[in-house]
Image: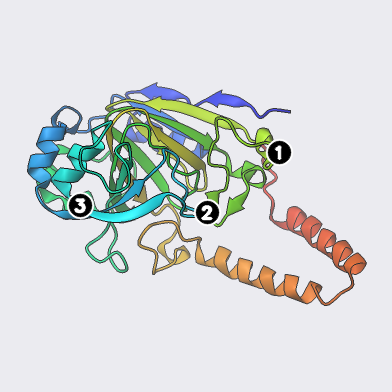
Amino acid sequence: MAGQHLPVPRLEGVSREQFMQHLYPQRKPLVLEGIDLGPCTSKWTVDYLSQVGGKKEVKIHVAAVAQMDFIRFLCVYFRTLPFDQLVQRAAEEKHKEFFVSEDEKYYLRSLGEDPRKDVADIRKQFPLLKGDIKFPEFFKEEQFFSSVFRISSPGLQLWTHYDVMDNLLIQVTGKKRVVLFSPRDAQYLYLKGTKSEVLNIDNPDLAKYPLFSKARRYECSLEAGDVLFIPALWFHNVISEEFGVGVNIFWKHLPSECYDKTDTYGNKDPTAASRAAQILDRALKTLAELPEEYRDFYARRMVLHIQDKAYSKNSE
């Protein structure tokens, strides 16, 4: 049976109070329209960004094909370009100068000054753009974690993944299509860490990934000025239908001690979840000492025990 295809709800003129009291507790994606984002949506043209960003060197991903494979790292290359050249190239369909091919795709995910220690914050890495954008005040200032500047070539499709923090995806310019999957459907997504193996979500290989057809699919289109609320643990796949600029704002909705202190990307599992996974690995190694018949029986009992003790009793 094919999974459901559901639209992500859209609301206009949502206040902080309405968001926090009525919408945020539902823990579901939502497109917010009419949010005051400052002049960035009209100001951040290719020429303006090239001029303001200048020759600052940025690390980028270069994709030989439209679908970026970040599990096997096939056809994806890491390169460095001056920011103004990145913007110019990313806005092109065909390139006179290129690394791999004339129709290669570019993707910038901004980093902190030292990515091992510092989180991304567009206000620090690109201070001349700071005054152009207003962050929606839908969380407390002390909860702020990062603001990630993103630039994508037209046609680029990012991999399906989840983040461990809530975030707002601000579509500053261009148009994106975003497909999301509920955390409850993780068993259908063929995960490797935080990522899904299924790259082509529109035409999946169901012989290889038969359970993928059961995943409920939530979909929306984002245009300049739209803001998508993506709750933590919701899987999302982003397709840039045009050259586009976006900013993700992540915040800590759990107590700070729940997060891995070495995490500068906001994608490491909470420390308790990591410890539980390590304990499970040890348990599975212990089970391996048993003959197959016993191993299978006690593994099934463990699964039932986990379902009984840890699964949410609330239905979506």
Q: Position of residue 215 (x, y in %)?
A: 64, 36
Height in image: 302 above or below 173? below
Q: Residue 85 shows which numbered tag? A: none
**What is the x, y in percent for residue 158?**
43, 42
Which quadrant is the C terminus positioned in? Answer: top right
State whether residue 191 is above or below residue 229: below
Q: Residue 85's x, y, as percent?
A: 16, 44
User: Quick one: quadrant of the N terminus?
Assistant: top right
- In the image, is residue 22 above or below residue 285? above
Amino acid of disc 2:
Thr
Which residue in the protein does label 3 denote? Answer: 81
Callout 1, which amino acid? Ala
Using residue 155 as the reference point, say whether residue 219 is left or right of it.
right
Q: Nearer the viewer, residue 220 or 309?
A: 220
CA gap, disc 1 and disc 2: 23 Å
Identify residue for label 2: 194
Res 22 seen here: no
The circle drawn on residue 207 is 1
Q: What secondary structure is found at the residue carrying circle 1?
A: loop
Tell which tag, 3 or 2, sits nearer the viewer: 3
Structural crowding at the residue carrying mark 1, measured as other residues with C-alpha within 10 Å and reported as few (<14), some (14–19) or many (≥20): few
- What is the spatial separation of the Cα atoms under label 3 and label 2, in whole angstroms? 28 Å
